Amino acid sequence: MALMQETLAAATVNRAGVRWTPLALGSLLLAAVMLVAVAIGTVPLGPAELLRGVWHGLIGEVTSTADVIVWQIRLPRVLLAALVGGALALAGVAYQGIFRNPLADPYLLGVASGASLGAAVAITLGVSLTWVGRFGVPGLSFAFALLAVLVVLLMARRGNRIPVLSLILAGVVVGSTFTAATSFLMLLTPERTAGVLAWLLGSFSTAGWSAIVTIFPFLLLAALCTLLAGRTLNLLQLGDEQAAQLGVPVEAAKLLLIAVATLATAAAVSVSGIIGFVGLLAPHAVRLALGPDHRTLTPLAMLLGALVTVLADLLARTVIAPAEIPIGVVTALVGGPFFLWLLRKQRNLL
């Protein structure tokens, strides 16, 4: 109720729109952290080597070891981590806004279960897809993630409406079914279980420019749609009936936002595996600090999600170097206690 009242105030009273100062500061902080993340690793790099590596990569003259580390290994990994974190936070904002539930996360409608099944099919059965080449695992995980949400939408549809409760229940059912199928595949091929488990825990160890180029168009489309729908998300917090009275095509808006949030989540998960808590915590943290106006909440949550994921990946690859900790383990270890702290700050959510 408190969230709804605050959002009502944001939607009807605050007409200032986007708050640019925190956005500018957040962008500068993210850029600085990304540069530090590129510099830190098993082989530490100075500012001069960092800049030279980026320049040589841009002009296509990557020759030295430092250039290779910067341009072919660390920079694409850090950029991919930022994109994935931003995408998960974006999806978290959209789902929480659509369902008016602050506990909604990017995996609510079975995206994670669908992507997991797709990855399990590709890894355990050794599926070879010539049309996706070496993108067999991300390609199938992306396709199965979209399939899972499509099944959820078909199950939840009631005429021309998609009731929220039916949508959530269908998501639980489909998610459980896909998870069971993933477990069954792992039992069938125990020699490949470790590979599936490593994917499920999340990692950017195989990051490259090709993965960035592949998912960027999906993430850009989802980000543009969600950012432009800031006022609509604000009005949806008032309830379907009141939002409709204020001119929002409620069902169409929900369907569009679900589609773009799912697209962003599926694209992110397909190249990184399952990374929990980022999409749940980033919107909460920004909402606590700056309020629930989605015109500011959405871009700032994306920046925070990107920042958290870059830092988590930095920890994952440096704490026990040269070995790596799955990034999903890092985000769970850090995100779980932080989420409990957030809940204590907002006791009215319990």
Image (spheres, rainbow, N blue to C red):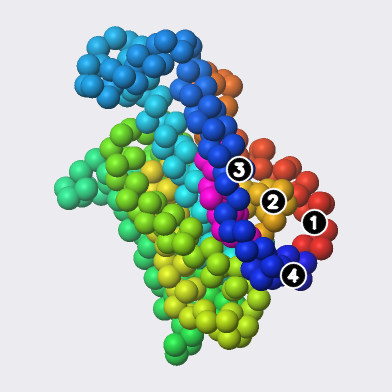
Which residue corresponds to the image point at 66% horizontal and 38% vertical from the top-left?
333
- Mark 3–mark 2 CB contact (< 8 Å): no
Identify the residue position indicated by label 3 in the image. Answer: 21
Predominant SS along the magenta part: helix
In x, y percent, where is residue 308? 58, 38
Identify the residue position indicated by label 2 in the image. Answer: 290
* Numbered badge on residue 346: 1
Task: Name the secondary structure under disc 4.
Answer: helix
Which corner quadrant of the image does residue 348 belong to? bottom right
Q: How far is disc 3 from disc 2 in space, using C-alphas?
A: 12 Å
Left or right: residue 25 compared with residue 290: left
Dot placed on the residue nearer the N-terminal end, 3 or 2:
3
Which corner quadrant of the image does residue 252 belong to? bottom left
18 relative to 254, above or below: above
> Label 4 sits on what residue type?
Gln
251 or 163, which is in the foreground?
251
Q: How far is disc 3 from disc 1 in space, using C-alphas?
A: 26 Å
From this viewpoint, is residue 36 visible? yes
152 relative to 44, above or below: below
Q: Residue furthest left?
A: 130
In x, y percent, where is residue 282? 62, 48
* Numbered badge on residue 5: 4
Task: Name the secondary structure under disc 1.
Answer: loop
**Residue numbers of the magenta segment:** 293-307
Dot placed on the residue nearer the N-terminal end, 1 or 4:
4
> Label 2 sits on what residue type?
Leu
